[in-house]
Amino acid sequence: MSNPPIIISASPHIHSEESLKKIMYDVVIALVPAFLVSLYVFGINAFIVAAVAVVSCLLFEYLIQKYLLKTNITIWDGSALITGILLAFNLPSGLPIWMVIVGSLFAIGVVKMSFGGLGFNIFNPALAARVFLLISFPVQMTMWPTAVVNNTQLIDGVTGATTLGIIKEGLMYGDTMTDLSSKIPSTLDMLLGITGGSIGEISALALLIGGAYLLYKRVISWYIPIIMLATITIMTGVFWLINPEQYANPLIQLLSGGAILGAFYMATDLVTSPITKKGMIVFAIGIGVITVVIRLFGAYPEGVSFAILIMNAFVPLINTYFKPRRFGSEIKSKIL
Amino acid sequence: MMGKAIKNTDVPVTKGTSGILVISEDEASRGEQQNCIRCGKCVSVCPMGLEPNLLMDLSEKGFYEKASSEDIMTCIECGSCSYVCPSHRPLLDYIRFGKNIVKKLEIVKN
């Protein structure tokens, strides 16, 4: 009777419970509250856009892996699922279906798979696809269905501007913040999500709950979201203190637009953020500064997606220059 | 968890043996290796402040001089990086491999 072969490997012989799938599905769980709010606010349209984005992302990844790259099929590792959900979260709920599919193809085909698949992409696929759609179809991408909680009006396609859009346009035509305060949603509405915007960004509270879950599960560290939001608060706060009639207060800046969605889910994307703590801090400050500059002085009302993509491009450089402190390196340099 | 695996029971217990661990197949089997997602977990657990993901890549692709300048020889082979890696990458295996070659190259140089 022969014994079964013994496979002997080098240490460490045990492994933590951690796995890629767990991380990815934790992110999916964290996105559920925000999705539920958008279903409540935007109704069936939000579900259709999200379903189309998720299915087409999975399908494109499968087709590319099977027929172009001819590698193992890894569509169930959760990364394409997250790309699909985050892409849908960045789109207005009234977007035509074929645009959602084009966006998914761009996200998976161009931004992710052409660089080599999971772990090799330079830019966040969902954000890059959103910016691609925003530049290609500026009209459809800025038609935000207004929040109507009982969903009856949405069939007629009632659209309105987002909070940041109202502020930007109003200030351009010479209105002051006091004039505009009656037009923008109240702070409580922005916190709960009864406001216009893309599918995922509307409810700050639901996003914060998901973000807290990610922090608790240690999928993300607090450096990027907290420092990014703090940078936005401080910068807009300074401008607001200088001239409260010309600049919106920091609370509006934080709760409106994609600031919280970007901070907790986009900027912290593991693949496209720096590896070291020091690098993360630099990265987060960069995003905050660029966001505020675009919001206050740029042509677009919202700048989080551009800011994150710009800083994504700097990540390899940040990783090269912000190394962790090597044990004993200071003593070594003193001796030499 | 960092001991030598033994193949049969002929290995003697000596004065220096601090313990014998029997690990079940489930615990000991290695997961399927996946792409590095740059989560930075290996960097944050490394007690020597190295970047195991970078060192593994450099050893794998044969950039030994660069690995040497990234302080690959400082690695104490604690195995924390391989233990924590969510993509089940054999980080320490490649770092050991790289260290061996860097050691040989330095001997040749001197």
Image (cartoon, rainbow, N blue to C red):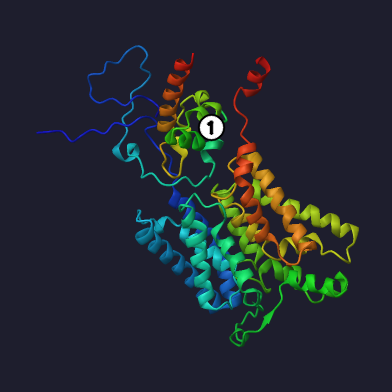
Horizontal and vertical percent for residue A158?
Answer: 65, 84
Q: In the drawing, does residue A234 fall left or right of residue A61? A: right
Instruction: Please tell me which residue lies in front, A172 or A258.
Output: A172
Q: Residue at x 82, y 76 (%)?
A: A182
Direction bottom: furthest residue? A156
Residue A169 lies in what quarter of the image?
A: bottom right
Return the chain for callout 1. Answer: B
Horizontal and vertical percent for residue B17?
Answer: 35, 17
Mark 1 nearby-residue class (10 Å; few <14, some 14–19, many ≥20): many
Residue A186 in view here: yes
Q: Which residue is mark 1?
A: B46
Residue A195 lies in what quarter of the image?
A: bottom right
Instruction: Please tell me which residue lies in front, A301 or A134.
Output: A134
Amino acid on which disc 1 is placed: Cys
Horizontal and vertical percent for residue A129?
Answer: 56, 64
Q: In the drawing, does residue B75 fall left or right of residue A336? A: left
Quadrant, the C terminus of chain A: top right
Residue A227 in view here: no
Q: Residue at x 32, y 13 (%)?
A: B14
